[in-house]
Amino acid sequence: MILLSRRSQLAIAAVVDVALHARPAPVAAKSLAARHHLPPRHLETLLQALVKAGILKGVRGPRGGYELAKERRRITAGEVVRAAMADGVEDLDPAPESKLVEQVVQPLVDKAGQTFLAQLDAVSIDDLCRESGDKAVFEGMSSGSDFTI
């Protein structure tokens, strides 16, 4: 059973990654993609959706990238998922035309979705950052930082 799309999972991972790696400089999309074994431009539309939602802030220039737009304790996983879903990329299949779906199944799915998102709203990016530190998720991985002068 899939409760969360790959796009939503990547959105949460991207925000946690930015929260962990955006100091002292913003996180480049290329570095972010490399840490998650994705093609460099794969995350761009997702990152832009997170900027539009006010979760991330884009920084331009040669040392540009992404950083959190607000404190990580004030960003919830539910907020990130809503931003990832907001552009409609996940809803590609046409909805069936059925009274049963419309009046019985869809209200059930909507209620389950609201409950699911409420659970995600109870988890902050700070909580996920602490858990990733406890589990040493990025231990031994290159941060992608370049300190050449």
Image (cartoon, grey):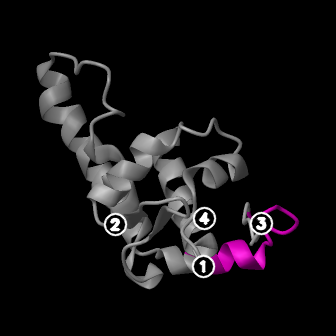
Side of 93 where 9 appears, left or right = right
Tell which circle, 1 or 2, labels the residue nearer the N-terminal end: 1
The amino acid on which the numbered mark 2 sits, given as a three-letter code, is Ala
Tell which circle, 4 or 1, labels the residue nearer the N-terminal end: 4
Bounds of the magenta segment: 128-143
Nearest the eye: 145 or 119: 145
The residue labelled by disc 1 is: 23
Position above or below: 58 against 49: below
Q: Position of residue 130 (x, y in %)?
A: 64, 81
The residue labelled by disc 2 is: 118
Q: Position of residue 98 (x, y in %)?
A: 15, 18
Q: Mark 4 to mark 1: distance in Å?
A: 11 Å
The residue under the point 54% across, 37% down is 41
10 Å neighbourhood of mark 3: few (<14), some, or many (≥20)? Answer: some
The residue most toward the front is: 149
CB under 8 Å between callouts 3 and 1? no
Q: Mark 1 to mark 2: distance in Å?
A: 30 Å
Q: Is residue 89 visible?
A: yes
The residue under the point 27% across, 36% down is 88
Q: Is residue 6 magenta?
A: no
The amino acid on which the numbered mark 1 sits, given as a three-letter code, is Arg
The residue labelled by disc 3 is: 138
The amino acid on which the numbered mark 3 sits, given as a three-letter code, is Phe
User: Which of the two marks, 3 or 1, is nearer to us in this view?
Assistant: 1
CB under 8 Å between callouts 4 and 2? no
Position above or below: 24 against 43: below
